[in-house]
Image (cartoon, rainbow, N blue to C red):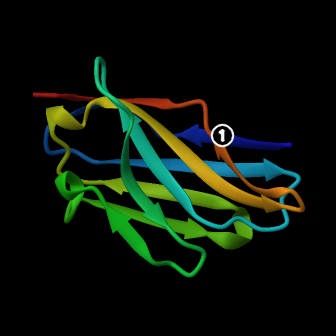
Amino acid sequence: QVQLVESGGGLVQAGGSLRLSCAASGSIFSINNMGWYRQAPGKQRELVAAITTGGNTNYHDSVKGRFTISRDNAKNTVYLQMNSLKPEDTAVYYCNADVPSRWGQYRYWGQGTQVTVSS
């Protein structure tokens, strides 16, 4: 079993910064892609950023140039540095990790952390 624990959410004023962390633990030999999704009230969950084992990244157009995803493979941890935050970034942020096993690959999710940006 694999657990993802997120931290770093909170309330911040527009233009401010937050750093989210997500640590994976449990029966892990390796992790393939890791990423962050978000879900605002009344909206579908959307991909914010993703990163491969080798460090290749992709971002939602709305966060390019403001958010940076990174990972520490030795610690099985993924980070999301969020700068120049806007009220429209307000959402619950979820991390994910794609973990391979003998039966295939399974996507695990964190419990979610609230990010609120005030105007």
* Residue sitting nearer the eye, 12 or 91: 91
Quarter holding the N terminus is top right
Crowd tier of the residue under label 1, counting other residues whose Cα lies within 10 Å: few below 14, some 14–19, many 20 or above: some
On screen, residue 95 above or below 31: above
Residue indicated by mark 1: 5
* Left or right: 111 in relation to 17: right
Percent of width and height locating residue 108: 67, 44
* Residue sitting nearer the eye, 99 or 90: 99
- Looking at the image, which residue is at 39% across and 34% down? 45
* Left or right: 109 in relation to 3: left
* Residue sitting nearer the eye, 39 or 82: 39
- Looking at the image, which residue is at 20% across and 58% down? 61
Residue positioned most to the bottom: 54
Percent of width and height locating residue 68: 35, 63
Residue positioned most to the left: 119
Percent of width and height locating residue 38: 38, 37
Quarter holding the C terminus is top left
- Looking at the image, which residue is at 85% across and 66% down? 29
Amino acid at circle 1:
Val
Residue positioned most to the front: 103
Quadrant in the picture for residue 34: bottom right
Provide the secondary structure element on which disc 1 rests. strand
- Looking at the image, which residue is at 58% across and 40% down? 6
On screen, residue 77 above or below 89: below
On screen, residue 95 above or below 78: above
Quadrant in the picture for residue 88: top left
Percent of width and height locating residue 87: 16, 32
* Left or right: 106 in relation to 7: right
